[in-house]
Image: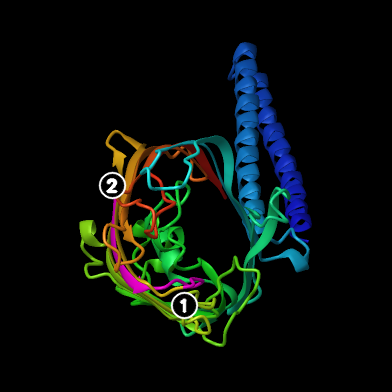
Amino acid sequence: MVWKKCMFLFIIFWCIFLLSSSHLYAGEAELINLLKKKGIITQQEAEQLLQEVRSETQKEKEDAKKSITTEIKADLKKDADKGDFLPKALKGFKFGAQIFTEWNAVNRFDGLPSNATIAKNSNQFVLNRGRFTLSKDINDWLGMNITADLFYNTDATNATNGAELRLKSAYANMKFYGTLTMVGMVPTPSDGYDNSIWAYRVQGKNLLDDLGILSTYDLGIVNQGVFGGYIDDEYLKYASKPFSGKWGGYMIGLYNGAGSTTSTGEGNENKVVSGLIYFRPFPTVSVLKGLQLAYFGAYGKSNKLSTVPGQTNNYPNFEVNMGQVSLLHRYFGVMGQYYWGQGAATGTEDNKRVGYLAEGYVRIPGVEKLRAFGKFYNYDPDTNIQENDYNIYVAGLSYDVAPELMPFVAWERRDNSNNVAKGTTNAANIDYNKYQVGVQVKF
């Protein structure tokens, strides 16, 4: 074992050191006594010299002890980081966790008289995420990842169960020719890319996930790579490496389409093709190295049968197109998205829909751990209906106490203007103001 080797070397070194230091002190003492006998130095001078020798010898011992202790601690930490102290079966495992929890209050408006929905306010503590990840590199090219998280079942028969644990992802990852291939319950491209730029998933979901258009994980196979290797290490201090190709990168996969949250699994024989490609035009320009242009697309059929009269035996079309531009810097990050498409991964219609988003954050000068952030998006779930869109506004502050801990406060507003009349697809979507005080903890 490594610790036995370190302990053996430690003991041997100290034996040699103590013997040599004792001999050194004895030799100097004999010389001083000889000088005193010859009358070259007085008794007082001899005692003073002996005291100085003792002090110097003791100081050398203390310095050597500190040096040895520091070296051994460094060696032990290096071995511990490599997992040398673990049983062979546990070596290479990595464990991570993430918690999103908050207090929020939602004040809903009454809506229009023609709207039959009764607005209800709320005031509650909530746990939005409790996630656990276990991964292992089996060898240089093969690994695995399993992620489980807590959720609240909304089914009538299970609504009283409280928080339950479910499998969010489970996949094998294989490295071939500088790319990464994942097979199993794997991530979809859009959500991971958004999270690499936008640091506030703790406040609310990313656009396509929030709108219920596309799941963040699904059963399938996906390949991911970069163009020109990865960008410099300085940039990677505040950026996500998987989406930090020097000149850009890609992520493309083939999925069932049902997503990880459905209990029915694959509902048809169709597969959804989903892909992301992004470019970094100025990787060597300091202020612009974080500029990225991206396109995301998904094409296939919904996983549920249509409810449109005359089409109940068909699976609705499902199509996503999204253009994105973002700029990530040490002191700020901004992103814009424009979405157009039809249907949803588990929708029962294939209405054409559009949406656009702008979001960003900035570190406060002089207090860089303090960040102000904001988000706005507009969404129209059916372009064939007039005055059917709505707006979401978000503003907040966060403080980076540590890389693992970020508390935040936020205000969110939904504004339908006059677009909540009964009969539109937004009939139940009443305006509201939402106030949040929460925290993100991760490691």
Which residue has dot 2 on it?
A: 417
Q: Give the range drawn in magenta.
A: 329-348
What residue is rendered at 34% in x and 58% in y? 235
Q: How far apart are marks 1 and 2 (CA)?
A: 30 Å
Residue nearer the viewer, 235 or 146:
146
Position of residue 58 in the picture relative to residue 201 (left or right): right
Task: Write the residue at 41% across / 53% down.
Answer: 427
* Residue 380 image position (x, y, % from top left): 32, 61
Callout 1, which amino acid? Pro
What residue does disc 1 label? 309
Residue 372 x, y percent position in the rendering: 33, 40
Residue 80 left/right relative to 226? right
Answer above or below: position of 206 versus 442: below
Q: Is residue 347 magenta?
A: yes
Q: Which of marks 1 and 2 is nearer the N terminus?
A: 1
**Which circle marks residue 274 in the picture?**
none
Q: How many labels does the image show?
A: 2
Left/right of residue 193 with respect to residue 9 in the rendered view = left
- 61 relative to 324, above or below: above
Nearer mark to the viewer, of 1 and 2: 1
**Around disc 1, counting alpha carbons within 10 Å, would you say few (fewer than 14), some (14 to 19), or many (20 or more)?**
few
* Disc 1 element: loop
Tell me the kind of residue under disc 2. Ser
Question: Does residue 184 show up?
Answer: yes
Where residue 293 appears, as percent x and y from the top left, is: 27, 69
Q: Which of 183 and 121 is in front in this view?
A: 121
View extreme (bottom): residue: 269
